[in-house]
Amino acid sequence: MRDTTGIQTMLDQVVDPCSIATGLPISLIDMGMVTKVTLNEDGVAHIGLRLTSPVCWQAANIIAQVEQVVARVPGVSKVICTVDPASEWTPDMMAAGPRAELRRLRPMGALS
């Protein structure tokens, strides 16, 4: 496997659409939605995602954005982005900083 730092940097620029609606745009990385990042010797990047809801109506848009930004990484020849429908997301998977900021914006126990 090859180094995936460039891919992870690009993924950090993809924002969860629902977080935009809350007024606090949070990247897929900080949301804890990225489950897998690999790059094989042929330049094929495999990105695994978990969605914040099994019925996420933004799934196709998220996948398209991931494929678009990762394809721009030097050395990437193909992007395969998959969603694991069995992988449940919880707020505890978020990075500490964004989670605390979201709790500040949405007090009243909105995040467990």
Image: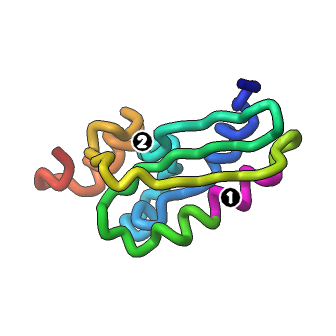
**Going 32% across and 40% down the picture, which residue do you hit?**
100
Q: Would you say 5 lies left or right of 96 here? A: right
As drawn, the residue found furthest toward the right would be: 74
- 96 w.r.t. 109: above or below: above
**In front of the other: 35 or 78:** 78
Q: Name the residue carrying label 1.
A: 67
**Going 48% across and 59% down the picture, which residue do you hit?**
16
Q: How is the image coloured?
A: rainbow
Say which element carries label 2.
loop
Crowd class of label 2 (few under 14; some 14 to 19; many from 20; radius 10 Å): many
At label 2, the amino acid type is Gly
Front: mark 2 or 1? 1
At label 1, the amino acid type is Glu
Residue 51, how many percent across, how many down?
38, 56
Residue 59, how many percent across, how many down?
47, 67
Q: Would you say 46 lies left or right of 22 here? A: right
- N-terminal of the two: label 2 or label 1? 2
Residue 74 image-quadrant placement: top right
Q: Which mark is residue 37?
A: none
Q: Name the residue carrying label 2.
A: 32
The magenta stretch spans which residues? 65-72
- 3 w.r.t. 36: above or below: above
Image quarter hosting the C terminus: top left
